[in-house]
Image (spheres, grey):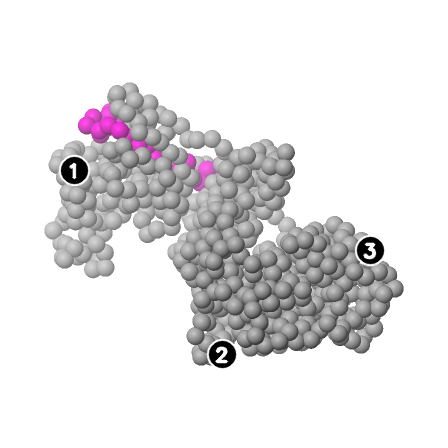
Amino acid sequence: MEDYTKFRLKKKDELESFLADKDNIFIVACNKCFREFELGGEPECGEFQAIVEGQGKTVAGSVSIDFLCNKTMTMKKLQNVLPSGAESAFVVSCGLGIQTVAGFAELPVFAACDSIPCDGSHGMALTKRRCDACGQCYLNLTGGICPIVDCSKSLINGQCGGCKKGKCEVDNNKDCAWENIYRRLEKQGRLSECLDRPAFFRDYSKSNFAFVNGYVQSIRESRLDGCYGGIHPRERKEISEGIAIKPFPAVRQVVIPLHQHTGSPALPLVKTGDMVQMGQKIGEAAGIVSAMIHASVSGKVAAVTMCPHPITGLDVLSVIIENDGKNTVHDSVKPCGNLDDLGAEDIVAIVREKGIVGMGGAAFPASVKLKPSKPIDTVLLNGCECEPLLTADHRLMLEYADGIIFGLGALIKAVSAAKGIIVIEDNKRDAIELMESKIADISNMEVAVVKTKYPQGAEKMLIKRVMNRHVPSGGLPLDVGCLVSNVSTAKAVSDAIQTGMPLVERVVTVTGERIARPGNFIVKTGTAVRDIVDYCGVIDDDVTIKLGGPMMGFVCGNLDVPVIKGCNGIIAIETAVFQADSCIKCGRCVDVCPMELLPLYYPKYSTEENWPAMNEKNVRDCIECGCCQYICSSKIPLLYSIKAGKKGIAEMMRK
């Protein structure tokens, strides 16, 4: 493809005139965008450094940054590398990157380049600043404020005299660009230096910018709403959000894996031929990070054998129970007492004994999270359900609000937190109003309404959005005094305390454009996905079945696998086939990454099996939300590279 959004160094004599009275220069270079992506730096930075050193000047340091116009990420990077001895910064980028650095850097900022002219705006900025790619950058003369785009009249020789109270006479809502230029130059003591210097005039021909415009869309305007990054995929929740929860019909047989959670598989407590009852423990947690497993139906143990796991596809030890249809409840299933009389240790013990895990998808043993190594001041209850199509948590909040609130109270008490916050996206207005009315008289609980955006429900995003706290790279919510739990998990905690019933069933949304009879069902763990799909009906043979949502769900190639504790949805969607092209470095994956990573590097490094480089690019901080893959202009399977990178790093560290 043709390279569009680029820049070139100013002529040597022009640069030398700006360097004449400067020293201790820091160089900031952009790695360019809208070009076929290759590893390795751009040559302009080295060329400019050679010019600086050729003038006998000291280079205080240099840094190359991807998508320099992305102010959020650029600020963080420059804070860590900007040397205290630097007296000025020269920026090797298009005008947008120069404006970005000049907007927050304390020291004077100069343009080392001119943008290559084109019919349209340069850059991938998340700000209102832009570069008109006029082919001649005046930012050296104007303190980093562009007179072409910031002045309504694009004046390049000073004010027009029409400024009124600092506002432009053409647009009363717009600051006078030249007044801002004067203020900044005066503050830096550069008025005479800049305004007495002649401009270098050029006449560059322009290239067609239509290709780039196809990628830069209006979605950029809302990129920073709520949390950094994220996307707005079509929700399609209307398919099932109005359908009340109902029990799924009893099945003849359940297959209950002894590994339904993060950590070690449970150890079997039953053998072939044993009779079991609903709620009876059939698997003992094997270690601290593990979970108890219980029978979801009553009947006879047909086998304890290896069966395929619904997520990994690998065979895991499972208990197959022939359902007698009686749902006889085990004697151990009984209320655990009044919450006011239970201590924190009692609640943790109940949660562990009843096999409760995080039900938002990760399935981490809840009892482990309830014994944090650091103080917790806030419990965040996640009711966002930001994945498209899924409505299980939404219906649960509408139909089991009291249970969720009881469970939140138990979680608050278990970790001695000061308060609990139920976080709900603003597309669930009915749930918001109900929850607000339910907790109106509860002093240590509140509802936080957040903007609908994927992946708003990811725990680090939730903490940043609601608490304005940043979980450090490689850190956990407890590092910032928070515990995040799903509303379904809170309901399970409520059931465990109030009825004594372990986690043996959950609400599952069955939906998608290819499902004939969608709904929200209470499904016993161990129920075969095939039984559910057959009951709800598939409209077309050319479908993809996923467990979970369309973004983070797992493709289910074998329907003869069971529903487990972490399965919140079964969706049938149209099979999509894409042909991957080469990365064009459009920067969209960087814009949408909620973890502020650089996903474009991962396929390159993964192909080379360069695991140290992937580790340096913080791939382990990736939450695998799929935003980068969803938005990728070249349809590159980024998640495949990300998962390969994490696996490669893990193996590298074991050696």
Q: Which residues are magenta?
A: 13-36
Kindly identify which residue carries mark 3.
305
Query: In the drawing, what numbered circle is on residue 190?
Result: 1
Query: What's the distance in space between the residues labelled 3 and 1, CA to CA?
Result: 79 Å
Q: Quadrant of residue 251?
A: bottom right
Query: In the drawing, what numbered circle is on residue 438?
Result: 2
Q: Nearer the viewer, mark 3 or mark 1?
A: 3
Q: At 15% from the left edge and 34% from the top edge, which residue is drawn? A: 193
Q: At 31% from the left edge and 49% from the top edge, which residue is drawn? A: 129
Q: Residue 347: image x %, image y %?
A: 59, 67
Nearest the viewer among 576 and 104 is 104
Q: Quadrant location of the C terminus? A: top right
Q: Upstream in the sequence, badge 1 or badge 2? A: 1
- The correct choice, above or below, for 225 with respect to 341 in the image is above
Nearest the viewer among 265 and 194 is 265
Query: What's the distance in space between the residues labelled 1 and 2, CA to CA?
Result: 61 Å
Q: Residue 490: image x %, image y %?
A: 57, 68
Q: Nearer the viewer, mark 1 or mark 2?
A: 2
**Label 1: element kind:** loop
